[in-house]
Image: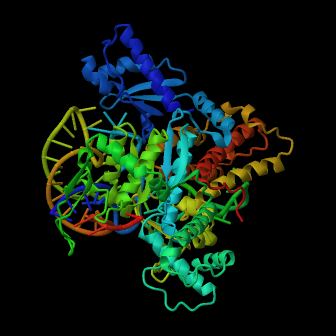
RNA sequence: GCACCCGUAGCUCAGUUGGAUAGAGCGCUGCCCUCCGAAGGCAGAGGUCACACGUUCGAGUCGUGUCGGGUGCGCCA
């Protein structure tokens, strides 16, 4: 339950009451009325800008209007103070009972706390990873993989119907090169000595077992035959093998996507024609000649007439070619087909997670979706910046050419899936991220994963201790006398727990999973702080042997903290730790 | 040349969709274990939010321009 949301509804209702009674003009538009949580605690538990945004329409000075509205808000349930402050804010303060109810909700909901139905079943498609099927995933892919997966988790948690999807770029010249690499390894597997591998093929060792399994299946059937005979079949074989590899890599990260869409299959079933017809019907396809790019003009530039999509009508900078000069389709054409397919499957919202190096394609893709959906379906594209892999502060050298890049699997093997997932979310997705293999394994507050896990483990520790030291204590968090929680630190902790549903909704709506990482860090800090207060002031400790009711109430608070941390980590796909080693 | 992303404390970064006196971690200084896990906590110092105009009750946040860094720019995917 998002109490800020319900409080806004109550505020709007109160103002409407004033409008109906004639205290305020009847035609005020309340859309801009907002409830937010001031950073300065002296400004109350929540504040509303209602008087500021309505002053003009009400033809009253903001502070005078604020006084009228504040009077009405004082009768809301749980409100003990409504003060006019600053230019016309109304600061609301709640009684402890209000917060005790919030804690009760959190404890009752457990690790499911914060889930909501505000998504109302909106069909959302999240496409992520979509790495070319030419080799195992490397660290760079891990970021997009985690961002996409957690984005999907968040959206699902607030009530959207989410499909997790992977787009397989299994067409084009790269697949021919993959097939040639497989054939070269296959000759090796068959006992031939094929000589040095030609430039441009995929030299990685990972093709060796694929070649062996091919040889085991087909024997020497593909030896000594012209390329045209085997290029297609071996390409198919290699793609299937690479996708198995990639699916395994993703599984290691805890990722299981629902749909794997093939570029080649889309084109083969006539998707390009369908897309072309759809766009042509809107008058968006024409034959034309593009201007050369101004700054870095390619040496071999010559004007050519090509089939173009009028993307400039939808916010793009130039119209984009969808057909190459040799008559085959561009990559963009395949992507149009794919996104039209997503639209045809009835999604209300599309989200693509891409690497930042694809930023130049955002506008044209959004233009295409806008054109194909007549502006009805938004396409949000999340660009993920590079991950700098470090080891104890030193960059880890990687050479893709030599095939010595660090794979996703290497990193997961080194630090574990949970650490990889969490760390990938500790920066906004469009910021560079340093990933230090040494630092993320440290057990100190420098390590955000550890810090949050430590808070969770401490919660578990207290609950374990309660059972041990007070064996006859009845532990039923739902029935605990929460009115015993009156300490300012306790109430502050509850206030933070209560803001979790709002944080989750906000992060989901804005497609920003990193916000949850920061929230968890702040909650952990608040808990550690409160914990240590018990060191200075023994009466604030969670376990008070001579006061069972107080202990029960505080255990409920601990259970609430544990629930929210577990809920957040659950959305991250990270297992909460109950005990540190 | 054009487009997109970024510019906030010495460093690495948040900033609740435009709110009040801009925050956290690291680093620095000084403190806190007879005590539920000190693997932690408290306090202090540290700022022209790159710069300049503009929009309004109010701008780190929105608009325009400038500077600086990154990414990309027809027949690669």
Q: Quadrant of residue A248?
A: bottom right
Query: Viewer-proximal residue, A417 or A545?
Result: A417
Query: Viewer-proximal residue, A126 or A417?
Result: A126
Residue beneath the point at 47% across and 55% down: A268
Residue B39 % position (x, y): 62, 64
Quarter holding the N terminus of chain A is top right
Taking A113 as reference, is A22 left or right? left
Residue A306 % position (x, y): 24, 58
| In this view, A460 is above or below A234 | above
Q: Residue furthest right?
A: A472
Query: Viewer-proximal residue, B46 or A289?
Result: A289
| In this view, A449 is above or below A173 | above
Can residue A497 be seen from the camera position used here?
yes
Q: Quadrant of residue A422?
A: bottom right
Query: How many numbered marks, from 0 up?
Result: 0
Query: Viewer-proximal residue, B54 or B62?
Result: B62
Residue B73 % position (x, y): 27, 65
Can residue A503 be seen from the camera position used here?
no
Quarter holding the C terminus of chain A is bottom right
Residue beneath the point at 51% across and 92% down: A195
Residue A4 % position (x, y): 49, 32
| In this view, A561 is above or below A485 | below
Taking A233 as reference, is B72 left or right? left
């Amino acid at each position: 339950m998002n109490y800020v949301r319900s409080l806004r509804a109550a505020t709007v209702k109160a103002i409407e009451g004033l409008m109906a009674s004639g205290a305020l003009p009847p035609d005020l538009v309340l859309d801009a009325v907002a409830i937010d949580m001031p950073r300065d605690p002296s400004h109350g538990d929540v504040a509303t800008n209602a008087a500021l945004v309505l002053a003009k329409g009400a033809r009253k000075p903001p502070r005078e209007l604020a006084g009228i509205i504040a009077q009405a808000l004082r009768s809301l349930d749980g409100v003990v103070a409504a003060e006019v402050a600053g230019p016309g804010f109304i600061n609301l303060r709640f009684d402890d009972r209000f917060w005790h109810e919030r804690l009760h909700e959190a404890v009752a909901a457990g690790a499911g706390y914060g889930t909501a139905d505000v998504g109302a079943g909106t069909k959302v498609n999240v496409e992520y990873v979509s790495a070319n099927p030419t080799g195992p995933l490397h660290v760079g892919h891990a970021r997009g993989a985690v961002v996409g997966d957690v984005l999907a988790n968040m959206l699902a948690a607030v009530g959207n119907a989410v499909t997790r999807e992977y787009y397989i770029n299994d067409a084009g010249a790269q697949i021919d090169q993959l097939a040639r690499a497989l054939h070269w390894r296959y000759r090796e597997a068959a006992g031939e000595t094929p000589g040095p591998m030609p430039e441009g093929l995929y030299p990685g060792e990972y093709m060796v077992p694929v070649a062996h399994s091919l040889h085991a299946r087909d024997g020497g059937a593909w030896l000594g035959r012209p390329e045209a005979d085997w290029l297609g079949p071996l390409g198919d074989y290699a793609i299937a093998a690479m996708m198995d590899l990639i699916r395994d890599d993703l599984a290691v990260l805890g990722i299981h996507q629902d749909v794997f869409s093939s570029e080649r299959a889309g084109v083969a079933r006539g998707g390009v024609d369908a897309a072309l017809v759809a766009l042509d019907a809107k008058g968006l396809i024409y034959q034309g000649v593009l201007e050369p790019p101004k700054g870095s003009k390619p040496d071999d530039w010559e004007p050519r007439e090509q089939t173009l999509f009028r993307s400039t009508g939808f916010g793009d900078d130039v119209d984009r070619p969808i057909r190459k000069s040799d008559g085959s389709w561009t990559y963009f054409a395949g992507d149009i087909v794919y996104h039209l397919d997503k639209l045809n499957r009835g999604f209300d919202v599309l989200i693509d997670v891409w690497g930042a190096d694809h930023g130049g394609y955002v506008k044209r893709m959004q233009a295409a979706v806008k054109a194909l959906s007549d502006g009805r379906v938004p396409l949000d594209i999340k660009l993920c910046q590079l991950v700098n892999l470090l080891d104890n502060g030193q960059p880890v050298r990687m050479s893709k050419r030599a095939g010595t890049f660090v794979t996703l699997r290497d990193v997961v093997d080194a630090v574990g899936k949970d650490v990889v997932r969490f760390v990938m979310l500790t920066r906004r997705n469009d910021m560079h991220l340093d990933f230090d293999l040494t630092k993320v394994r440290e057990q100190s507050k420098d390590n955000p994963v550890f810090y949050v896990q430590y808070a969770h483990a401490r919660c578990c520790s207290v609950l374990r201790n309660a059972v041990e030291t007070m064996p006859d204590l009845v532990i039923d968090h739902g029935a605990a006398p929460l009115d015993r929680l009156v300490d300012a630190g306790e109430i502050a902790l509850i206030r933070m727990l209560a803001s979790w549903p709002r944080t989750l909704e906000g992060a989901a709506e804005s497609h920003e999973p990193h916000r949850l990482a920061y929230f968890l860090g702040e909650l952990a800090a608040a808990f550690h702080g409160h914990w240590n207060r018990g060191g200075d002031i023994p009466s604030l400790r969670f376990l008070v042997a001579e006061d069972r009711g107080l202990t029960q109430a505080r255990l409920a608070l601990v259970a609430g903290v544990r629930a929210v941390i577990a809920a957040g980590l659950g959305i991250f796909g990270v297992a909460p730790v109950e005990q540190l080693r």
